[in-house]
Each structure stands twice: as structure tokens, then as C-alpha cells.
Image (spheres, rainbow, N blue to C red):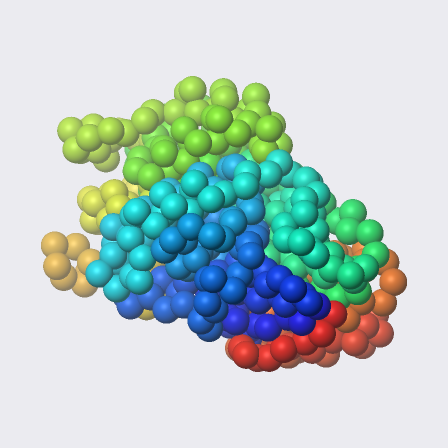
Amino acid sequence: MEVTFLGGAKEVGKSALLVKGRKNQIVMDYGANTGKEPSFPMHVKPKEVHSVLLSHAHLDHSGGVPLFFLRDGVKLVTTGLSLELTSLLLQDFIKLSGFYLPFEYIDLLTMQKNTERIAMNDERQVAEEFTAKFPSSGHIPGGTTIILENDGRRLLYTGDVNLRDSQLISGMDTDFGEVDAVITESTYSMVDHEPREKIENDFVAFANEVVERGGVLLVPAFSVGRAQEIALLLRAKNFKHKVAMDGMALKTNEILFRYQEFLRDAELFRKTMENIEVVSGWGERKRLIRTPSVIISPAGMLMGGASVFYNQSLSQDQRNGISIVAFQVPGSPGRTLLDRGMTLVGGKMVPVKAEVRRFDFSGHSGRTELFEMLSRLKGKPKVYTTHGDGDSCDVFAKQITEKYGFESQAPEVGDKITV
Ligand SMILES: [Zn+2]
């Protein structure tokens, strides 16, 4: 099979691969860069594609998928949970950026109608000459890696992966069997995360500290995954005070209730969500900012959603706290808060008085885990490094060759390889 890197090569964003067999073509992920004016991977004619395989719901992997469904004819293959979470994120994407997008809500419905929903670890024929297997990726609920097989050759595409368990989901499944080539993410190939247990304990200690001094802790968090992870963590560590959740994260909860088989501890999830305060209106928000508690609210980078209101209301009192628990894109309000201690209140940039702390709750493997994943590969596959900023893809490729003797390279967008 021949693989073309349509996007996500030497960059984080708009991941996409085109795989050509003798008769059929398959696309794996087709993401978007979700800036003010979104951009998409290299163009592929939908009528030449048999199916699109989607690793997980994040928009940098799924944001361009509706482009294949402007009419019927293509099949989407992904887990039922990924389909629902993708639909949720795409609806929001259309609402925020609709004017710039080359698809609309109706195409989302065509996409849903043409989806083959699979269970985790299913093996399927995805085109006449292709079969694919979808083991869990440990990255977000519903997410998988993809092992694509054609003519006796096997390609592992990792999508985004996390080797370690989190509160919400179990770590990735590394039972790959023998593969001829690997296309791996490289997001944190240059850095290690702090030990998870330490991050978790530090976070819960900070939450206790803020609430016990009469303050409110705001946790701006992405709706899918991180918001639930934080709520579950507080419950698992016996946090005794009020925890409230707001915005689109609540819609994610509703979806996860229907897909509990994807969760690491469904019982913990149920108990957590039954005890959480569901915020549903402005009266409640205004009451909440005066009640010592933890408020988990999208958007994760303070770029919209109710977290903007909470941030404005809470940032000017030193008893309060703001926990940054996700990566903050340079230029985002969350990044400005972290780097400069400044935030927008009433249209003016002002210093933040609340205590701001960052906790590295990543959904990605760090450097040690990425190497550990590769060390579990059987045989001598060729390794292609993608989904990394700056020169991290190049450096990672070089280090893989030095460490394991695998032939390895960091492809550019537009490059083609043969597996
Ligand atoms: Zn992701």
C-alpha cells in the first residue's frame, strides 16, 4: 500500500493520511486546524475514497471528515462513542466557525447515516482489499489506534495515544502483533510528564486549600475527557466539598452514560456524576461564584463558554484559584493568564489576583511512554514520526533509529511512502 501524508506531518493539527491499495483508497483521520479561519489537510476527491477510518473525536483528527459526506457514497468507520463525541464537537465547530467551513449541519447528518459503528478492538473489512483493527488508544473515551492490513502488509497508525491509565479510561492496548510500519504521534517526544500520582495529589491539595480558605476554584477544561477526568479525580481522592460542572461538558457526560463499557471504572463515573452539581442557568452561575466550591467549565483555554464568565468574576479575588489543566495555545487567554498573570475583565487587561496554577494532566504519552510503546513492537518495522511541533518529529525519528535500529523518518506534508 502507498501512504500519503495529507496533514499533521511536522505539525500538530489537521492530521490526515491517504492509503492507496491496488483497487481502493482509504483515508485515516481528516482533521482541521481550528483557528479563526479553519484550514484542512490536502484535498482528496471523496468519490475516489471507499472509507474514512477515524481514530478519535478531537477536531484536529475529525474536523474535516464531513467533507467526505457532502453526498452519500463514502463509509465512515469508527466507534459509536467516537461518532457521538465527534458530532458534538463538530456541531460546536459549525456554530463557531460556520461561515468559514466548506460543510454544514446537514452534511453531519449524512456522515452519521453512513457510519459503521464498531466496538473497541473490532476487526473489520473496510474495503475490498483492506481490513482494519481498532485497539484502544487510551487517549480519550472511544479513541483507538488503527492497524490497517493490505496484501499481507500491516500498518499501525497510532493517532494520539496514552500508555498509562487515567481516572476515566484505561491506558492504550499495545498488543499490536507484528507490523511492517508504524506512523506514530510525537507530541511529547521531547519531554516527560511529571508522575501522574504527584500531579493528581498536588491538584487535589490545591482544590482543598482554595475551598477551605473560602474561595472558589475555577478549572477551565475541555468538554470531552478532561472535564470528566478532573471530576472523577476529586471523587476518587475523597474531595469533600461542592463540585459543579457547566456547559458542553455536561453533554459529554450524557453521551458517556450511554457508553460506560468504554470507561475504566463505570461505577466511579456514575457516582461522580450523580453527585456533581449540574449548572444550568445564569442565576445558578451567579450564586455559585459566591459559594466555596470547584467549578469545572469549558472552554479549556478560556476562549469561550461559561469559563469566560467565571474567569472574569473570580480572577479579582485572591481567595479564589484558577487551575490550568490543559495545553494552552500561544495567544489564547489561558496562555496569557499563565505567562503574564493578566486577563480580560470588562474589556480591559488587568492583573489577576486569584492564585493561578498549572497542572500537566496530559492525555498524551510523554517521552518515556512513547519509547516504551515502540519497545513493545515485534520485528523491525519502519517508523514514521508525525504530530509534533518544531523539530520534535525529526529528533524523535533520529533517536528511534539510535535506540532500536528501526529505520525511521519524519515525513513532510505531501510525502508518499510504500508499506
Ligand atoms: Zn487527540
User: Residue 315: x, y in percent?
Assistant: 25, 49
Residue 370 makes an appearance in the image: yes
Q: Residue at x 47, y 26 (%)?
A: 257
Q: Position of residue 217 (x, y in %)?
A: 35, 40
Q: Nearer the viewer, residue 325 or 381?
A: 381
Image: 85 above or below 107: above
Which residue does the image show at 70% across and 51% down from the upper left? Answer: 131
Quadrant assignment for the N terminus = bottom right
Pinpoint residue 149: horizontal percent, then vertical percent. Answer: 73, 57
In percent of width and height, residue 316 lies at 21, 49
Q: Is residue 297 left or right of residue 14?
A: left
In-front residue for pair 415/250: 415
At 75% from the left and 66% from the top, the residue drawn is 181
Q: Is residue 406 above or below residue 117?
A: below
Please identify the residue farthest to the right as the structure is shown. Answer: 379
Q: Quadrant of the C terminus?
A: bottom right
Front residue of this view, candidates 407 and 273 = 407
Q: Nearer the viewer, residue 365 or 136?
A: 136
